[in-house]
Image (cartoon, rainbow, N blue to C red):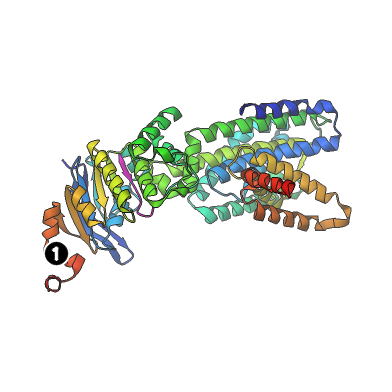
Amino acid sequence: MKKYPPLIILALLTLLPLVGLSSYAMHIIILVIMWSVIGMAWNLLGGYCGQVSFGHAAFFGVGAYTSGILYQKLGVSAWWGMPLSIVVVTCFSLVIGFICLRLRGPFFALATLAMGVILRVTAENLTGFTQGDLGIMIRERTWVGKTWYFYIILALAAATFLLIKKIVESKLGYYFVAIREDQDAAESLGIHTTLYKTIALCVSGVLTGTAGVFYMNYMGYIDPKVVFALHDISIVAIMVVMVGGVATYWGPVIGSLIMVLLAELIRSIPALGVAYQTLFGILLIVIIIFLPNGITGDLPKLKSLFRFQRAS
Amino acid sequence: MPLLSVRQVSRFFGGLAALTEVSLDVRKGEILGLIGPNGAGKTTLFNVINGFYAPSRGDVFFKEKRISHLKPNKICAMGIARTFQVVKPLRRMTVLDNVVASAFLRAKNKSEATEKAFEILRFSGLYDDRDILSKGLPLGKRKRLEIARALATGPEMLLLDESFAGLNPTELNESIAVIKKIKDRGITMMVIEHHMKVIMSISDRIVVLNYGEKIAEGTPAEVGNNPLVITAYLGVAENAAN
């Protein structure tokens, strides 16, 4: 029985475009799925392997720019960025890993934070290559409707989910968690910690990069402030996982559902104006205080809360 | 031919000599006790053998291969496993998963690793606790989990760092029984221990460290009667006699 829920959800989702939802609703759903991909990718490195990254926008942006520059300079479809970004982001991750993974805990987090900022500034100033703040625009969209974009991101999410499940249940997963729990103990148990941390970083980076490629193709426009954003990409990637549940399969999916919907909901209250960000922040703080393990992690706690209310 | 040979190893931390010209051999199949007052350099010696520290001078040889300057994971893969004085369980993993993670070092796939883990858990008497998160274990069992985890890596030699400290008498006896069973499997051990009764009863030979220097080596009886050792532990001999 346990095997079926993911399949049922996937089947229901494939039928979704037939319902004839509005273009806005489809847009929100596509965003939710895209954020689940990024969340799942972050979760592999941060949740399972314990290497908290504050710079996942770097991978997202490198993926998006690989695709964008391919289109801009060579004039081929930006979708070719999908396969190419795997190569580019892997090389990029290896360099980043070589520099950052020798640091532990908060130092690693700070190094990745810096990495995101460095890339943004680089992309802003390397105008010959990235067009700087002008950004890259795809003049002819592949499809006008949302349906195919939906199917592509859904396929990407399903593949990501499966890949991560396979990894976590294998030797790699055990090694990642061992490294998270105690790096010295892991090392003395014969685990080549640097190697396995690098693997986690590469897989996480590549998956985030493919989400970036999708973003380029779907939105049709990127600039450094959008794809290398600290608060809109890097922090949201962390929040999606924190809210949903760290080191769980469904956490990032549930987290992105809540985060995207919440953000849209609060943004749509006109009276709030720019203050919506404040409210958003406060809500997140409340969630973290009361559900430190995320919604999936604290499910028993949530259930008992509801039972208590019904009883009283 | 000794299994492990520590040759003239010194280790400095800044101006402090934690180990000075320490040499010792561990023969295959024996239990070598390592004792000494607090701060004598016992754990530092383990950290040097295990690869956490490179020796400042001198070398360590395992099966005639030089292992000093190798990384801990390489040394573990060669067959030296260790436990930690301050236990380091993989806290948010179950007892079983702790051992499975270690068994992967020499297992080809997950089922082989799991099988090996089950065998080790039965062997070390932790089988009934296999589904508990390791942070929930009492100290005695956590210390034994350290041993189980080290065993799961399939070592030829085991470094036990105070695996008996803080145990109650029942736990103590259980752990001693486990150590004797490990010896019967032909695994060589080096044991750091403060509990004199334990160390005297399980060790084949004992090496005594004091202020980073080796001051005595021999059978438990020889070491127990060595005036230098008595001085190191109890102060000057005349005072002790009065």
Residue B180: x, y in percent?
Answer: 24, 42
Q: Residue pushed farthest front?
A: A312
Q: Is disc 1 placed on a helix, strand or loop? A: helix
Residue A36: x, y in percent?
Answer: 68, 39
Q: For residue B57, which quarter of the picture?
A: bottom left
The segment highlighted magenta reads B79-88
Residue B200: x, y in percent?
Answer: 19, 52
With respect to residue B100, does A238 lie above or below? below
Question: Magenta segment: does it hold B82?
Answer: yes
How dense is the environment of label 1, judged by Cα within 10 Å: few (below 14), some, or many (20 and up)? some
Front one among B184 and A310: A310
Amino acid carrying mark 1 in the image = Leu
Q: Residue pushed farthest right?
A: A271
Front one among A153 and A3: A3
Residue B60: x, y in percent?
Answer: 25, 48
Q: Residue at 52%, 44% (x, y): give it.
A: A49
Q: For residue B101, which quarter of the picture?
A: top left
Residue under circle 1? B228
